Amino acid sequence: MKSRIVAITIILAHFLVFSSFAQQINQTVRGTIIDQDSQMPLIGATVVVVGSDPILGAAADIDGNFRIDNVPIGRVTLKVTSVGYEDKTIPNLLISSAKEEILNITLLESVNTLDEIVIKATVPQGEALNEMAIISAHTFSVEETQRYAGSFDDPARMVSAFAGVSGNAEGNNDIIVRGNSSKGILWRLEGIAIPNPNHFSGEGSTGGPINALSSKMLSNSDFFTGAFAPEYGDATSGVFDMKLKNGNNENKEYTAAISTLGLDMTAEGPFQEGGRSSYIANYRYSALDLLDRAGLVDFGGVPRYQDLSFKVRLPINNRHNIALFGLGGSSSIDTEETDEKNENLITGKFSGQNKLGVIGLTHTFQMNDNIYFKSALAASGTENSFRFAIPDDANQFYTVDDGAISKTSLIGSTSFNYKLNAKHKIEAGIIFTGLGFNMDVDSWDDDTDVLTNDLLEKGNSSTFQGYASWKYRINEEFTMINGVHYLRFALNGNYSIEPRMALKWQMNNQQSFNIGAGIHSKLDVISTYLAKNYANNGTYTQPNKDLEITKAAHFVLGYDNQITSNTHLKIETYYQHLYDVPVENSDLTAFSLLNQTEGYTSRQLVNDGKGRNYGLELTAERYLHNGLYYMSTLSLFRSLYTTKGGEERKSAFDNNYVANLIGGKEFNVGASSKNKMFFVNTKIALIGGQRYSPIDLEASIAADRPITDELNPFSKKGDDIFRADFSIGLRRNRTRTTTELKLDIQNVLNNQTVLDEYYVRASQSIYQGKQLGMLPTLSYKISF
């Protein structure tokens, strides 16, 4: 009898043990550890899951690869160490049951060693991926892009929470950095400059309502707000340096999502079992378009869009790596504008179509243990066609704007990277861009009452850029970066030589001071250089063909305090002097290109304008820890410009202040075996009132077109802009499957502050442009 009881007890014990194992879902964390400066694998470097018991960890093999199996799902923190290198902590990785976590980890060699006993320093969280950037740099992850309330998985909307950055309250994801126009932004993908990657974008703009690149395709990326590293050119306000993730080279993984914005499908995996190559691809389609085609919705102006992005990684051997990547998108909308007071009165009809395409090939050649080359070939193109019509007195519509603009770029680049030793690294590169264009734009001439051609050009030009930078780590405390960038525009032969420098003083493991300075420049859209200006006899000139390149001198001073391992304080103050700014060659207007966010102009411009931006930025942040995170930012600034007559005025972006408070909490809910996580996130933003030029109604009615005081533009300031975003959701892990249901509401209080005003010919009235109202988005995602 006793033996039976013992046997039953043993069986029950085994059952309970196996049941507990069945309830615990684990995942694999793997990747590569390399030297930050030389890109060589770090053999023997160790990765440990902090707090694991028994300890979970692994050491890198001869190729720098490591693998940790049976990592519990949820949030984990990794610590990476290697003899002779500074430690790195990777906090709060979100491990899911559906996808392996694949990391590419870089470690920085210590400059002080003695008999292999290293004076250790810990790399602070948020350190820029670009080792040549040590000031005004922000690194963001895909998980942050998807977590922040109101971001809609769009990195451009997410970065509006950073100090010094404000978004577009009317709904676009334009990025205003330190009082500069969004036209000063540079978009890069896989190290290549790309056109505006947004659907429904206008000529010359850098933003749009919806980003054409899904965040599910992104790896950790950098965003810079000033004093850029020497490799970045043709930018005066900010740089978005996006990296695509590599597909899983061992297992096939899939993600499908549906939301009120669209359908979203992602697939990744190896080409063959046991191989090193991989692919990842994403496709999205507008949900409203599908509903409209099915007859389930019925309203004017349905936005139609779709996009495709991919990356194929093809490692040849330990010396050569090739990757092919691409991005394509198309969008269109046909809409009717109606009067605010009388919805039956149609005041305008607009039709627009946009297409975007990028394809590129990158090659990395590891020449030896200290030298590597990175080269790329890429082609990109955009098409933008539009038509706008308004009614006459007989309510017959006539066209006032009609155009089609297509552009292409062929890009070739190569960079040389040489790590002399732990203290010195040299980087130099060249970038050649061949530009093609075919532009035909007609606009209504109010003086002659006919549709007149503004732009009719087909041809090509080019730009050439070269750069060199030197990183000198004087000791563990001081790092200095010096370099120069060169930009030449072949259309008119103008060029810019731009010296740059940065210095970092790491006082101790917690505190550092940074300083950066440099010259930066930005070309305007090529349509501005080629636009026509007609005389009364019908002849025309192209007055802007020889415009100089707009330039900006940046000066930044920063202080950083890693108060604890999870809390962080950052302060930066800056001054920007803009010069050679194109302004209208007339004493009767105060027109300056610094105030434009899109489009081109046929006004006669000269480079006699100037500008000043200066301010103070504060960031207090708690990184996600124990399920809680927050970030509070405050930006106080001025944005001024000088007219041709020498008068200094407030710019269109002189909002004076931007304050953000974002935060969130994750809760494990239900039984632990259910692996459910409930999350809530919020973002609260207060932005100084937007400046605009008031309409002179009587003069506009008399002239039958909008009339403003051109000597006093942006003289009116609207009320402060307040917006609260909120998201809530539930994430659940099952074996090899993760699901997420989320409700994300932008402007939950439905505030609609007046931002601008427009003259409407049809009703001879002024229309107030307002802040985008409440916009809820419900989404469901499954990964397997």
Image (cartoon, rainbow, N blue to C red):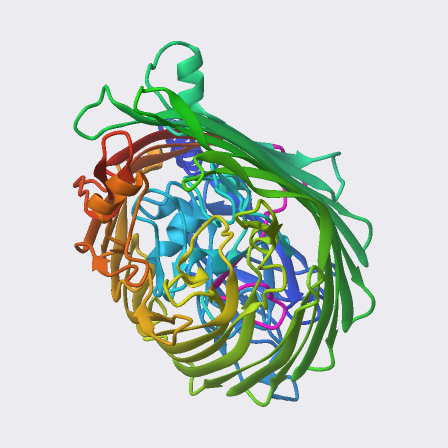
Residue 229: image location, x then y, percent:
57, 72
Q: Residue furthest front?
A: 537
Residue nearer the viewer, 742 or 317: 742
Magenta: main secondary structure = loop
Q: Residue furthest top?
A: 295
- Answer with the quarter of the image where residue 626 lies: bottom left
Q: Is residue 680 visible?
A: no
Residue nearer the viewer, 139 or 691: 691
Q: Is residue 409 left or right of residue 475?
A: right
Residue 740: image location, x then y, percent:
37, 33
Residue nearer the viewer, 582 or 684: 582
Say whether residue 248 is magenta: yes
Placement of the N terminus among the 4 image quadrants: top left
Q: Is residue 252 left or right of residue 571?
A: right
Is 600 placed above or below 522 here?
A: above
Q: Is residue 665 visible?
A: yes
Residue nearer the viewer, 136 or 34: 136
Residue 585: image location, x then y, percent:
47, 65
The magenta region covers: 229-252
Q: Residue at x 58, y 61 (%)?
A: 523
Residue 420: image location, x then y, percent:
74, 81
- Answer with the quarter of the image where residue 9 lies: top left
Q: Is residue 109 left or right of residue 590?
A: right
